[in-house]
Amino acid sequence: MTTNARKLENCTYGDYLTWPEEERWEIIEGVPYAMSPAPPPRHQIISGNLFVQIHPFLVDKDCLVFYAPFDVRLPKSDESDQNITTVVQPDISVICDPAKIDDRGCRGAPDFIVEILSPHTSRKDQVEKLALYEKHGVKEYWIIYPDYATVIVRLLGEDGKYGPPKINEADGNLEAAVLPDLTIDLDAVFERREGETW
């Protein structure tokens, strides 16, 4: 199947499993999105800096943290994996229900997701995924803007909707609401080493 043809189809996770492993795709409500071959270095550095702060905090807890590529399947109800029409690869996923984790990744909504914007994914992360994560009950969603060293936090309210965005610049600490006592050092997340130009 060609890339262009694939974009026109109503795709499922069953289709996704047949696509070449060297290609990276996400499917949102049946619509496939090609992912960039590899994120830029700045994206990777921010992701790594964030992961190394979250992982040690969770060592003695029930929650687990994963970084992309890691498949998160979001079923509408109890349909089989083959028929699921949404599978995404968040940059960072924290899952506190071990029953959701299997050898294919995660089935069901993570508790906490982080997406790091790049030019290729900016609209998808801020619009399509925002609506998707709200719909499926992701309790906390962080959108990171590398160029501005800023984090936008969205928290799910009791009404099942995200509240107003909270804007946090890279200055000091930011607490993760769904992981009590986890405080992220934003200066360390966005730190640039001497000589870095990206």
Image (tube, rainbow, N blue to C red):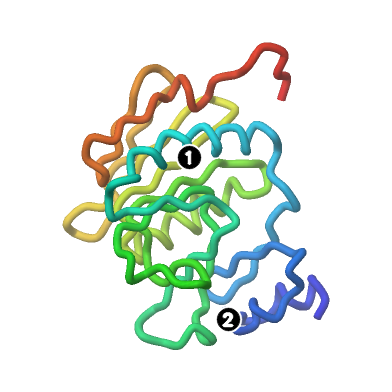
Q: Quadrant of residue 59?
A: top left
Q: x%, y% of residue 104?
A: 52, 72
Which residue is rendered at x = 28% and y = 55% of the image? 62
Which residue is rendered at x = 48% and y = 40% of the image? 51
Q: x%, y% of residue 114?
A: 45, 46
Vertically, is 38 above or below 173?
below
Q: Quadrant of the N terminus?
A: bottom right
**Helix or strand or loop: what does disc 1 sit on?**
helix
Which of 198/117 is in front?
198
Give the amino acid type for the residue marked by disc 2 in the picture. Thr
Vertically, is 131 above or below 106?
above
Residue beneath disc 2: 12
Residue 16 circle label: none
Give the amino acid type for the residue marked by disc 1 in the picture. Phe
Vertically, is 77 above or below 20?
below
Going by the picture, which residue comes out furthest to the front?
Answer: 60
Q: Do callouts 2 and 1 mark residues in contact (Cβ within 8 Å)?
A: no
Local crowd at mark 1 within 10 Å, few (<14), some, or many (≥20)?
some
Residue beneath disc 1: 51
Which of 196/36 is in front?
196
Vertically, is 112 above or below 148?
below
Local crowd at mark 2 within 10 Å, few (<14), some, or many (≥20)?
many
Q: Quadrant of residue 182?
A: top left
Q: x%, y% of residue 7?
A: 71, 72
Which residue is rendered at x = 29% and y = 42% of the image? 164
